[in-house]
Amino acid sequence: MSEDAYFLYHALGQYPGKAEDMATAMTAFAEVWAAPNDAQWGYALGERARFINLWTDLISAADGTVTTCESVTAGLSSLMGALPAQDLKGKKVLVAADCFPSNHFLLTGLAERIGFDLVTVPLRQGATWVEDEDMIARWDDQVGLALLTWVSSTASRRCDLAALVAHGRAQGSTIGVDITQAAGLLPFDVMEPQVDFAISTSLKWMCGTPGAGILYVAPALIERAKPTLRGWFSQDNPFSWDLGAFQFAPDIRRFDSGTPSIVACAASVRAMEWHARQDKADLLAHNRTLCAQIIEGAQTLGLDFASPLDPEARGGSVMFRLPADIPGADAVAFLKENGCMVDARGQTLRASPGVVTNAEGVAVLLDGLGRLMSLRQRRA
C-alpha cells in the first residue's frame, strides 16, 4: 500500500526514513546494553535526557520542568497524586465530555478516593464537540482543577485555550491541558497562555513510539507538589541511600520514581530530532492544503462533517459522521481495500494528512468515499 494515502496522523505519525531511524536507534541501544562493561547507564540516561530536552524546546518550557511518563494517563495520575489535599478535597474537577476517554476513566476512579466532585461538561444535542462557553458556564470558584483538551480526538476541534485559561485564572483553579492531538503540528507554548501542567505522548504528529509520554509542570506547582509515586530517582541525588533522609528533588525530577523507562525514549529520539529539523510552518501548511482538498471533495459528495470547517478552530484532522447504515468498521475496511488508511471511532471516520501524504493520496481517499456512498445509494 502506498504511503501517499496515509491518513492516520491522529494515531501514528510517519516520516521518510522512520523505519531506518528506529532500527539504528534500537541497534545502538542493544549494542550498548548488551556489552560486558559499565557503559549502559551513562548511555541510557543520555538518550532520555536528549528526549526530554527535545520536548522542552518544542513546548518552550523551562529547564527542569519536563519529565517522562508512560502515557498521558500515567502523567495525569502522577500529577493528581502530587497535589496538596486541600487543592482537590471537597472541590470540583472540571473536564469536557470529549476529552480523551482514558483520562476520564482515571478521574472517575480518583473522585471518590481523593474526595472531589467530577464535573463532566456534556455535548449539546447532536454536537460533536463541547463548546467553550459551556465549559465556562460550569467553571466557578469551586473548581480546584480543570483538565482541558486542546484538540479533541473525535472532532479535531481546537478549543480557545487563551479564553479558557483566562477564565480559569479568575476562578483560582489549577489548569492542565492535554496537547496530544496537536503537539508537533500546531505551535504550543506552556507560557502562552500560562498553564500549570501539560501532558502528551510522542505518537501522532511527533511520529514517535508508544510509552514515550511527557509531563510538564510549572515551577510554582512543582514547589507545592509531593508525588505519592516516588522512589530513588525522585531525589536530587538518586544514590542517596539513607532511609531516613529522603527529600524530593527541587525540580521536575520529583515526579520521577523508580528506575526510569528508557527504551521508548531512545526509540523516539530520532523522530524528535527529525521533527526539530523541519520547518514547522511548512508542516502545518502542507496539512492545511490537504485538509482543504479533503473538505472541498467531501462537500461535493454531501458528507456530514464532524469537524469544524474553519482551520483556526480545527486541529490536523477532518472527520465525518457516517450514515447509520454504513458501520464505521466497514467503511475503514472498504477504504483500506482501495488503498487508503483511515480509522473510525464509532460512526466518526477520521482522516489526518501528514508529511508522507500528498494530493494523489487525497484523490484516492475521495474516490473511495465516493464509491462508498454510491454503493449505499444503490443498496437503497
Image (cartoon, rainbow, N blue to C red):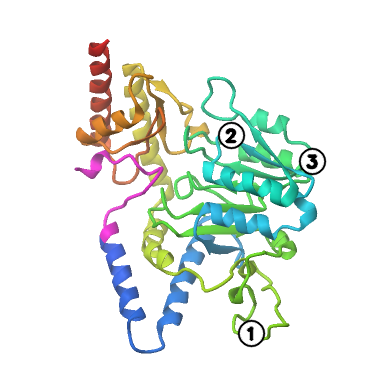
Instruction: Mark 3: give few (<14), some (14-19) or many (20+) Cα within 10 Å.
Output: some
Using residue 157 as the reference point, say whether residue 236 is left or right of it: right
Residue 290 location, x and y as percent? Answer: 34, 34
Residue 279 location, x and y as percent? Answer: 40, 51
Is-magenta flag for residue 16?
yes
- Element at badge 2? loop
- Numbered range of the magenta stretch: 1-19
Instruction: Mark 1: give few (<14), some (14-19) or many (20+) Cα within 10 Å.
Output: few
Residue 44 seen: yes
Give the overall secondary structure of the magenta segment: loop
Identified by mark 3, the residue type is: Gln
Residue 298 location, x and y as percent? Answer: 34, 22
Residue nearest the observer in this picture, 96 or 379 = 379
Q: Quadrant of residue 295?
A: top left
- Element at badge 3? loop
Please give the name of the residue rendered at 68% of the width and 86% of the height, measured from the top-left corner.
242
Q: Quadrant of residue 380?
A: top left
Residue nearest the observer in this picture, 354 or 365 = 365
- Element at badge 1? loop
Quadrant location of the N terminus in the rendered image:
top left
Identified by mark 1, the residue type is: Ser
Residue nearest the observer in this picture, 303 or 96 = 96
Residue 259 is labelled as none
| Circle 3 residue | 142
| Circle 2 residue | 97
Is-magenta flag for residue 49?
no
Please give the name of the residue rendered at 47% of the width and 34% of the height, measured from the top-left corner.
154
Residue 60 seen: no
Identified by mark 2, the residue type is: Ala
